[in-house]
């Protein structure tokens, strides 16, 4: 029997939700609570990361509610966003774990709640992230801001160090960060291995690091690879 036109219209306007949690009983309880709201509809469920990504691709949800304790739970956020760019990710955690918060935000999540919240709070959070808001527990906001400011200072300092390198040294560092040895750098830049070694020693001094590994880690940690391969104006 076909659903009434009014019901079809409501379904089309409803916020489409994907639930990803390993516990089927928890998913069923959340689904029942969410679908009691006229503007919310669960369109898919998943019990692990790969299934969550596949279901997101199949159902194109507006919001994915993901349990961070799933294997590689933080990474699931970015994988779902890759497949469904418009999907917002609301992460559920067992407690207010600061490291989890940083990881999921880095991976593209837009909301973070603990499973201790009331269903009404989850409903409100689902609507909020769907509208584009970012939700963080108030008690975690201060440390989060401090961390973001600290990261900005670190990156500013890293850019200052990179600016001290010559164009050739930046080219050498880019190759070094990709794992090239002296011979590989020499071949790529058409220079001698000895010249490559000299450039590397100069780079270590200017970056205040003690080894090639530290130099490569400096590039990766500070996200400055584009500074190395993009000509300065």
Image (spheres, helix red, strand yellow):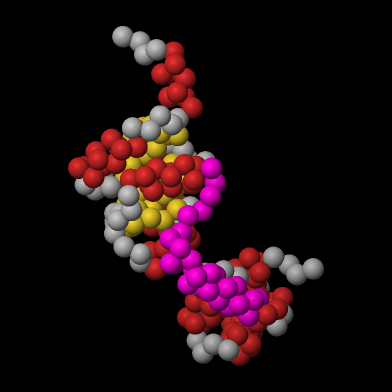
Is residue 154 inside the magenta stretch?
yes
The secondary structure that dominates the magenta segment is: helix
User: Vertically, is 75 above or below 33?
Assistant: below
Please provide the residue range marked out in magenta: 131-159
Q: Residue furthest top?
A: 1
> Residue at position x 60%, y 85% from top?
207
Q: Name the image quarter holding residue 224.
A: bottom right
In terms of depth relative to the viewer, which is nearer, 59 or 120? Answer: 120
> Residue at position x 34%, y 57% from top?
114
Q: Residue furthest right?
A: 233
In terms of depth relative to the viewer, which is nearer, 114 or 169? Answer: 114
In terms of depth relative to the viewer, which is nearer, 145 or 87? Answer: 145
Place of residue 31 in the rendered image (x, y in percent of width and height, measured from the top left): 30, 37
Place of residue 117 in the rendered image (x, y in percent of width and height, measured from the top left): 33, 53
Q: Name the image quarter holding residue 59.
A: top left
User: Vertically, is 135 above or below 31?
Assistant: below
User: Vertically, is 206 above or below 29?
Assistant: below
Place of residue 57 in the rendered image (x, y in percent of width and height, measured from the top left): 41, 37
Is residue 29 inside the magenta stretch?
no
């Amino acid at each position: 029997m076909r659903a009434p036109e009014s019901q079809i219209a409501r379904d089309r306007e409803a916020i489409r939700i994907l639930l990803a949690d390993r516990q089927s009983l928890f998913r069923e309880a959340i689904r029942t609570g969410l679908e009691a709201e006229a503007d919310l509809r669960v369109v898919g469920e998943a019990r692990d990361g790969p299934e969550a990504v596949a279901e997101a691709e199949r159902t194109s949800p507006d919001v994915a509610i993901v349990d961070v304790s799933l294997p590689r739970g933080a990474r699931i956020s970015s994988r779902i966003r890759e497949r469904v760019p418009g999907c917002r990710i609301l992460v559920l955690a067992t407690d207010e774990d600061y490291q989890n918060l940083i990881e999921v935000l880095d991976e593209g999540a837009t909301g973070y709640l603990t499973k201790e919240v009331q269903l009404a709070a989850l409903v409100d959070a689902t609507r909020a992230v769907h509208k584009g808001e970012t939700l963080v527990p108030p008690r975690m906001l201060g440390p989060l801001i401090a961390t973001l400011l600290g990261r900005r200072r670190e990156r500013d300092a890293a850019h200052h160090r990179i600016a001290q390198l010559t164009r050739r040294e930046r080219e050498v560092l880019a190759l070094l960060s990709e794992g090239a040895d002296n011979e590989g750098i020499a071949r790529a830049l058409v220079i001698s291995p000895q010249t490559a070694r000299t450039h590397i020693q100069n780079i270590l001094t200017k970056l205040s690091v003690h080894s090639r590994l530290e130099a490569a880690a400096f590039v990766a940690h500070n996200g400055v690879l584009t500074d190395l391969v993009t000509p300065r104006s």
